[in-house]
Image (cartoon, grey):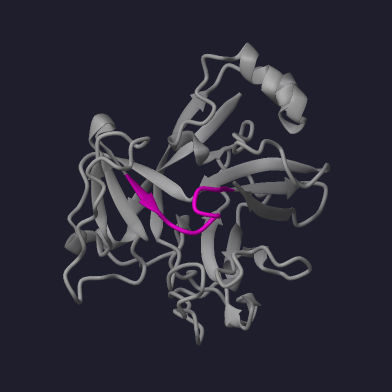
């Protein structure tokens, strides 16, 4: 199945945002303040603001902009509450400036003042070799594990592919759990850790702690982070950043999905405009 992995640029290492672009975290561009969701008595944090861009992200309308918000006071886990908000707005509803509502920078119990901001600068197309007709097997636990045996050459839990658009979901170790049933279809997933090739920035450049390690699976090795100097912290910076010497890539944390979880996003194309739901799981 064909899928796409986004390429990221950390916002604190880029010029200030001056137009609507697809991104993770930060504050929403141009959002009318009456659309800003709240939970636990505070404004929620923007997880993603994503423009319609097929085939990577098909929202059914060239003017559609998807918004995902997360409450970091409860983590998005309060039953019966709108603690994981999702909505689609046309571009015409958005102003041409960053939106900030009173309390947007409140530091919640389960995270930082903002979800770490990163711009999507491009896409890499891949095909995992799994036939499209086998997609239903991804949504049944027994058939999913059997599928992993058949396609054993795939690294099913590879870190970079935990953020992917299209194709089939790469579930966490808990497997297919709590996903919206049909007519909802898998749209994309975002991990709480994102990847960028190359050596890391300094703590002062990026505005957050920076650690270095040899193996992502051996956090005890050289993992003590260097801190930015006082006054060099950035509110929209990643929560933390680590350099993996073995793979020459740095990995940055954006939000709290139970410390190591992934967000899964689904779309209902039978509704106009299309209906989107999301949740996270470990």
Whole-percent x, y for residue 115 in the image: 45, 64
Q: Examine the image and state in which quarter residue 273 appears.
A: bottom right
**Image quarter in which the N terminus is found:** top right
Whole-percent x, y for residue 64 in the image: 62, 57
* Residue 132 appears in the picture as rendered: no
The residue closer to the viewer here, 53 or 130, is: 130
Residue pictured at 79% horizontal, 55% vertical:
272
Q: Examine the image and state in which quarter residue 73 appears.
A: bottom right
The residue closer to the viewer here, 126 or 92, is: 126
Residue pictured at 51% horizontal, 14% vertical:
153
Question: As drawn, is 115 to the left or to the right of 209?
Answer: right
Residue pictured at 74% horizontal, 53% vertical:
274
Whole-percent x, y for residue 47 in the image: 53, 61
Q: Which residues are magenta?
A: 251-262
The residue closer to the viewer here, 86 or 53, is: 86
Tell which residue pokes out farthest to the bottom in this image.
102
* Residue 128 appears in the picture as rendered: yes
Tell which residue pokes out farthest to the front in this image.
220
Question: As drawn, is 114 to the left or to the right of 40?
Answer: left
Q: Examine the image and state in which quarter residue 221 appears.
A: top left
On screen, residue 94 above or below 177 = below
Residue pictured at 82% horizontal, 47% vertical:
270
Whole-percent x, y for residue 39 in the image: 65, 76
Q: Does 156 appear in magenta?
A: no
SS assignment for the magenta stretch, majority:
loop
Q: How many marks?
A: 0
On screen, residue 21 above or below 45 = above
């Amino acid at each position: 199945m064909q899928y796409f992995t986004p390429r990221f640029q950390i916002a604190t290492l880029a010029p200030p945002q001056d137009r609507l672009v697809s991104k993770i975290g930060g504050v929403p561009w141009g959002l009318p303040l009456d659309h800003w969701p709240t939970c636990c008595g505070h404004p929620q944090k923007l997880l993603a603001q994503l423009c319609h861009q097929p085939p990577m992200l098909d929202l059914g309308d060239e003017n559609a902009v998807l918004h995902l918000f997360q409450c970091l006071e409860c983590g998005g886990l309060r039953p019966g509450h709108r603690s994981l908000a999702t909505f689609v707005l046309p571009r015409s509803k958005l102003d041409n400036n960053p939106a900030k509502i009173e309390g947007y920078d409140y530091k919640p119990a389960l995270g930082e003042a903002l979800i770490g901001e990163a711009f999507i600068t491009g896409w890499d197309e891949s095909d995992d070799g799994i036939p499209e007709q086998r997609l239903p097997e991804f949504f049944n636990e027994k058939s999913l594990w059997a599928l992993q045996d058949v396609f054993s050459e795939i690294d099913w839990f590879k870190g970079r592919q935990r953020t992917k658009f299209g194709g089939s979901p790469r579930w966490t170790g808990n497997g297919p759990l709590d996903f919206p049933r049909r007519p909802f279809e898998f749209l994309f997933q975002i991990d709480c850790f994102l990847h960028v090739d190359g050596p890391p920035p300094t703590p002062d450049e990026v505005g957050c702690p920076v650690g270095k390690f040899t193996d992502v699976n051996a956090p005890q090795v050289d993992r003590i982070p260097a801190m930015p100097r006082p006054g060099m912290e950035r509110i929209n910076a990643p929560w933390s950043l680590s350099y993996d010497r073995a793979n020459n890539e740095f990995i940055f944390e954006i939000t709290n999905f139970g410390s190591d979880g992934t967000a899964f996003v689904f779309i209902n194309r039978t509704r106009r405009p299309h209906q989107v739901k999301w949740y996270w799981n470990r």
